[in-house]
């Protein structure tokens, strides 16, 4: 359960299940975006060496399954009401 979260949705992701496993497709639960969030429909995603360090637990502390691919480009699907810098349907990117 997710205390304090009223709604969840299912999202596709790529994750490693263990340090010696390759990234593979999974589905994950995400909380509904808050007024401070931008929900992005991801169109492209890069997997860099930092993702591999995390997937292989080379920096320690990795919690599995670990979703990787933190450099993304997509389209803003929803923009939180407190945010003024973007609007829905514009291309946007992020680093998480
Ligand atoms: Zn990176």
Image: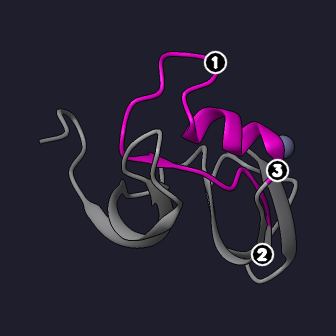
Crowd tier of the residue under label 3, counting other residues whose Cα lies within 10 Å: few below 14, some 14–19, many 20 or above: few
Q: Secondary structure at mark 2?
A: strand
Evaluate if marks 2 and 1 touch, with contact meaning CB atoms under 8 Å apart.
no
Residue positioned 17% across, 33% down in the render: 3
Residue at the spot of label 1:
59
* Of the image marks 2 and 1, the number of the one nearer the N terminus: 1
Is residue 77 toward the left or the right of residue 49 in the image?
left
In the image, is the residue at mark 3 within 8 Å of ligand 1 by its beta carbon? yes
**Which one is in front, 93 or 65?**
65
Residue positioned 60% across, 43% down in the render: 36
Q: Magenta segment, which residues?
A: 48-72
Q: Which mark is residue 48?
A: 3
Depth check, mark 2 against mark 1: the one in front is: 1
* Residue 47: percent from left, percent from top: 76, 58
Q: Is residue 14 visible?
A: yes
**Which one is in front, 6 or 25?**
25
Image quadrant where one finds the N terminus: top left
Alpha-carbon distance for marks 3 and 1? Answer: 15 Å
């Amino acid at each position: 359960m997710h205390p304090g979260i009223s709604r969840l949705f299912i999202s596709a992701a790529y994750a490693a299940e263990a340090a010696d496993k390759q990234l593979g497709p999974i589905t994950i639960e995400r909380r509904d975006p808050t007024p401070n969030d931008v929900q992005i429909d991801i169109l492209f995603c890069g997997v860099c060496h930092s993702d591999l360090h995390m997937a292989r637990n080379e920096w320690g502390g990795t919690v599995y399954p670990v979703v990787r691919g933190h450099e993304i480009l997509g389209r803003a699907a929803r923009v939180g009401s407190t945010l003024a810098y973007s609007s829905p349907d514009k291309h946007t990117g992020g680093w998480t």
